[in-house]
Image: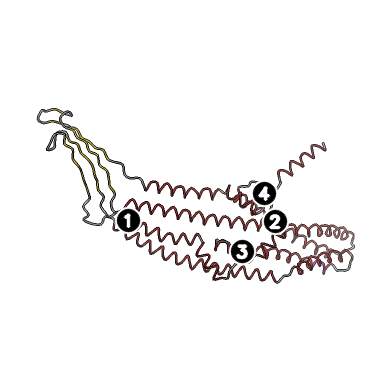
Amino acid sequence: MNKIAGLFVVISSLMTAQQQMSLLDCENAFQTNNLQLLAEQYNINMADADILQAKIWELPQLSGYINAYNPEDKRAFNVSKAKGAEVTQLIYMGGKKKNEIAFAKSNKELAQLQFSQLLVELKTQLHTTYYNLYYEQLKLDNTNKQLVYMNDLLSAYKVQSAKGNVSLKDEVRLQSIVIQLNNDKIGINKNILEFEQNLKVLTGVTEDIEPQLSESEAKEVLAAQPFGDEVELKRKAVENNADYLYNLKLIDNSKLYSQWQKSLNVPDLNVGAQWDQNSGTFRNEVNLMVGIPLPLWKSNQGNIEKANYAIKQNQKNAEYQKLNLETKVQSAYKTWKGQYDQLAEIKTTDLNNLELVYNGMLKNFRNGNVSLIEFTDFMESYRQTALQIYDMKNEIIQSAEQLNQLVQTKIFY
């Protein structure tokens, strides 16, 4: 029986096992498995297919005729004396095919920029979720540590309260702290489940992911600062942000479309050869055929005007996107700087002192050197401070990731 029970314990532990992964491991899994990224890649493939299609000419047209009724000989379907055939080919004029191909190639460049932007956005989601999970797990560990002690203390007070050695008020005071800690734990666990789910979707890894990040590595990430000031970051963002570059490329794309529409006003040629058995000037004559529409009016003028308006619209959109991007970079930088400076004011010695005081309070309370009121007041303050410090560190990294997403080039060194 003991062996069977042990086997169940092993199986249970395997089923609930977590996979430790570094951020680089998660990025590699993301590049390979992310379904959104893989689906977006097909837009580039479809753009390649559009380029191929744009290069294809219209098929030659083959037509023919036979006699239906010969009134002289009063014969129907007198094929032996009257029949003919012709072959025609549409010849594009005015650079139509060249312009159509150029427009299709421009569409591919747009698809590539859309893919780049999606890659950046999803990668940012991956990073922010990874660090969110890391700090939520630290908060959970800290909360569990406090709960272990406070639950033991509450159990002891319940026994003494039942005996009348301590007041019920003291028991309730401890109970309120335990309830608050359990409430914190519920919220933290809810966040952890959400972040684990998001990581699974982003990486395609079905197991729960446990961030493999040492304390020294986390400190290095927190200590990193962007290279350059606000002005430099704006300049880099304008040069590298795929979403803004997409809007710039839309201007070129609409100009190519307008050029293509203008070329459609140029009449095309229909060139062909005709063979006629008996109804022409000569028997079995072969004729050269040339056909062209009469350009009495511009048949595509409406589409040309529409394309010109699209150019102006895309120019205004690009101006807006540039202003919006620069404003976002400015705001993100100020947010990061404010949070970074705020955490910098809290020295490492201050954090160490907080833990020293915490351990000292536990020891002194056990020894009866601290009253219950002093102890519970400190525990409530410590609980809030510990959570706030983890949130402060996490928010710095989140702000840095937002800057990275906007600038889209290496800025933290």
The residue indicated by pointer 4 is: 208
Tell me the CA gap for discs 1 and 2: 57 Å
Residue at (80% x, 57% y) in the render: 148
Q: What element carries label 4?
A: strand
- Provide the residue designation for mark 1: 261
Q: Relative to the observer, which residue lies in front, 265 or 129?
A: 265
Q: Is residue 236 magenta?
A: no
Do labels 1 and 3 touch, CB within 8 Å? no
Q: In which quarter of the image is residue 317?
A: bottom left
Of circles 4 and 2, which is in front?
A: 2
Which residue corresponds to mark 2?
213
**Measuring 44% from the left and 52% from the top, which residue is drawn there?**
108
Residue 217 picture location, percent across and down: 69, 59
Label drawn at residue 412: 3
Q: Is residue 49 above or below residue 148?
A: above
How far across and how far down the image is residue 379, in percent?
78, 65
